[in-house]
Amino acid sequence: MTCCWSVSNLTDKRKKFGDELSKGMQQKLNLCLGLLPDPDIILLDEPMIGLDPHAIKELKQFIEEERQAGKTMLISTHIIDSVDMMWDRTIIMQNGQIKANVSKEEIDSTGKTLEELFFEVTEGVDKEETVSENAAKAESEEG
């Protein structure tokens, strides 16, 4: 695993303590430290918080590269559109309960976005009915 984007931006800060860094620099440092051992399973909790747009772009590229390399990525976020193109399976939780556990193919078959599914599930619409109804509707329109 290379964390060059973060290391190169942190070299001039090497004599500073972590609490002397900006929020974005602290986030980059934490990401690099967590990824140093090159783990096969990577858990990222709100990884884009505090990062500038350039760093977010590079982090998304890194996440995609790790996915392609066969690594398991678990990303926890409240910013749904930040991960909209980077997922294979989503688990939506509310009040500590799993409300939806769907693959990208399942939601794509409904024509909905991840954000639309999130709001349907968390605002009381039954996900199973919605996915099933939309899949049936798509099949009837094709036939």
Image (tube, rainbow, N blue to C red):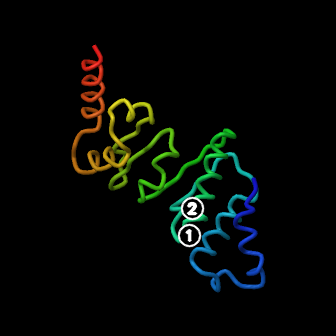
Secondary structure under tag 2 reads helix
Point out residue 2 in the picture as x, y percentages from the top left corner.
Answer: 76, 56
- Quadrant in the rendering for residue 18: bottom right
Instruction: Report whether 49 appears left or right of 134.
Output: right
Front position in the image: 106 or 76 = 106
Residue type, numbered disc 1: Asp
Residue at the (77%, 76%) spot, across then down: 11
Residue type, numbered disc 2: Ile
Task: Check if mark 1's residue and mark 2's residue have beta carbons within 8 Å.
Answer: yes
Label 2, on which residue?
Answer: 56
Point out residue 118 in the picture as x, y percentages from the top left corner.
Answer: 33, 48
Residue at the (35%, 49%) spot, across then down: 115
Quarter of the C terminus within the rendering: top left
For the residue carrying disc 2, how many other residues have a C-alpha within 10 Å: few (<14), some (14-19), or many (20+)?
A: some
Residue at the (30%, 32%) spot, across then down: 131
Front position in the image: 126 or 88 = 88
Instruction: Report whether 41 appears left or right of 102.
Output: right
Point out residue 136 in the picture as x, y percentages from the top left corner.
Answer: 27, 22
Residue at the (27%, 29%) spot, across then down: 134
CA separation in Å, label 1 and label 2: 6 Å
Secondary structure under tag 1 reads loop
Front position in the image: 59 or 98 = 59
Point out residue 21 in the picture as x, y percentages from the top left corner.
Answer: 64, 82
Label 1, on which residue?
Answer: 52
The circle on residue 90 is none
Instruction: Report whether 124 appears left or right of 19.
Output: left
For the residue carrying disc 1, how many other residues have a C-alpha within 10 Å: few (<14), some (14-19), or many (20+)?
A: few
